[in-house]
Image: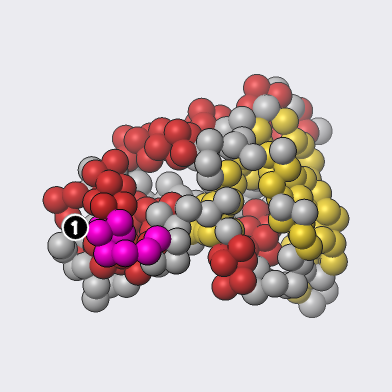
Amino acid sequence: MKVLEVKNLTKKFGGFTALNNVSFSLEEGQVTSIIGPNGAGKTTAIRLISGELDPSGGQIIFKGARITKASLNKHAIRGISRTFQVPSVFSTLSVIDNLRMAARARHVGKVAIDNRCEGILEEVRMLPDMNRMAGELAHSKKRILEWCMSVIQEPDVLLMDELGAGLADSELASLYDLIKAKAKTITPLFVEHRLEFVFRISDRVIVLHEGERIADGSPSEIKSNEEVRKAYYGGD
């Protein structure tokens, strides 16, 4: 079942076209990643889908409704959440208070919220950090906390922009295993440059190059795609 559709999505910044007539859909429960060389338009696509930017053309359809011009907050209320390249947490609040604030969007009652918060912290092995100030955490733990804050809101779609930035391979592998397990209820869309993890976790990979979609398929199909190889490594 299609949970989100992007049709002919275009974004121009003055005379520069960052994204040009890109179309794809997200299937419920399927892990999808967007990859491509630097400047391909990956982050622009995420910013458009999340409502952070307005498109210059095209449509975004979420669960059958057009949301092309909706704001970031309205998208979040509808059920589209995202993480950022730089972790976005409340530094002066404790880890669990960060989660409590995020959880209030979907959960009611202090006991229910605290149970949910402690449960997800246990999943990511951060329960011992629950009373620490978020600003005291290492970058990698801030990244994981931000992901937890998104997941605890139980969105239908979770957009993740360079989630692995600053994480060790072992940390990223553990987090991706959790994401894969939660894909049954939260449909993820990744932008990620570490291709080994993209190919490990993804059911489907979309490749952008110079603002256009040049490939769309399974990890094995993308690995063997000659046009993708040329986009990354050059050559005739």
Task: Name which residue lies at 43% across and 47% down.
Answer: 164
Task: Name which residue lies at 53% across and 45% down.
Answer: 186
Q: How many marks can you see?
A: 1
Q: Image quarter for residue 179?
A: top left
Q: Image quarter for residue 31?
A: top right
**Quadrant where the C terminus is found in the figure:** top right
Q: In the image, is 10 to the left or to the right of 142?
A: right
Q: Is residue 7 magenta?
A: no
The amino acid type found where label 1 is placed reads Met
Local secondary structure at mark 1: loop
Q: Position of residue 109 (x, y in %)?
A: 31, 64
Q: In the image, is 77 to the left or to the right of 215?
A: left
- Res 41 seen here: no
Q: Position of residue 43 (x, y in %)?
A: 61, 58
- Seen from the viewer's position, the closer of residues 97 and 109 is 109
Q: Which residue is tagged 1?
A: 130
Span shown in magenta: 107-114
Task: Name which residue lies at 25% across and 59% down.
Answer: 111
Q: Position of residue 189 (x, y in %)?
A: 59, 46
Chief secondary structure of the magenta span? helix
